[in-house]
Image (spheres, rainbow, N blue to C red):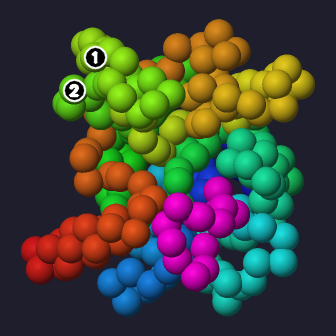
Amino acid sequence: MNGSSHPRCFALLPCAGSGSRAGTAQPKQYQPLAGLPLVRHTLAAFAGVARIARVLVVVAPGDETLAAHDASFTIAPCGGSTRAESVFNGLAALQALGAAMHDWVLVHDAARCLVTPAQIDALIDACLPDAVGGLLALPLADTLKCADVAGRVAATLDRTGKWLAQTPQMFRLGALQAALAAAHADTGFAGITDEASAMEAAGHRPLLVRGSAQNFKVTYPEDFALAEAVLQSRARL
């Protein structure tokens, strides 16, 4: 697929979750939002980034929601029971499609539908010269509390140096695959909530690249109204 050794950038969207916290009748990534299924807004952002060689959407086996032909992305029906498993399977699918171990993979939550091409490009710019790779993230602005088992405040934590992890998260395919394989062998993916945590467990220190507060993951019922308001405001610009 690539005749040179120059590393390419691929996008991988795990899209096999049920979105149980969203309170929707169908998986939240397919819930209508501003006239389109939510994930279509996510895909549109990646379609606007020229340096992305291919977008791979990892869906659950048997999920044909996105089955209509669309040349802007490829579907891999290899989703697992966890995000980490879906990403791990997706990396193998990318290899089968011709991706090399030294190529970069940008893993992005399908439900972060407000990411912009400019934010994706900023992450690529920051990570291409980096030895490890990194992720979009946001410095913590709010006071951070620790709760006890009764749901009362146990302590106020120092927020200095703390960031909220976002996506995309960009790492070399081979390094990320090795980190996830090691995590699976060690704990069965327990505690691996994103790709950076797998890389950290493997001894790497991912780069933090400042993202945007608008790049939030649609998770709860009230998030849909907020995401729709942002999309509508962008449409008016």
**Residue at image point 45% right, 84% down:** 32
| Residue 108, position as x, y percentages in the image | 53, 51
**Residue at image point 67% right, 29% down:** 191
> For the residue labelled by badge 2, is the local secondary structure a helix, a strand or a loop?
loop
The reply to whether discs 1 and 2 touch (Cβ–Cβ < 8 Å) is yes
Residues drawn in magenta: 14-27
Q: Which residue is mark 1?
A: 156
Q: Which residue is mark 2?
A: 143
Query: Counting other residues with Cα less than 10 Å from the Cα at mark 1, is it few (<14), some (14-19), or many (20 or more)?
Result: few
- Between 24 and 88, the residue placed more toward the observer is 24
Quarter of the image for residue 35 reads bottom left
| Residue 190, position as x, y percentages in the image | 74, 31
Specify the amino acid type for callout 2. Thr
> For the residue labelled by badge 1, is the local secondary structure a helix, a strand or a loop?
strand
Above-or-below relation of 41 to 181: below
Res 40 visible: no
Q: Residue furthest front?
A: 150
Quarter of the image for residue 127 reads top left
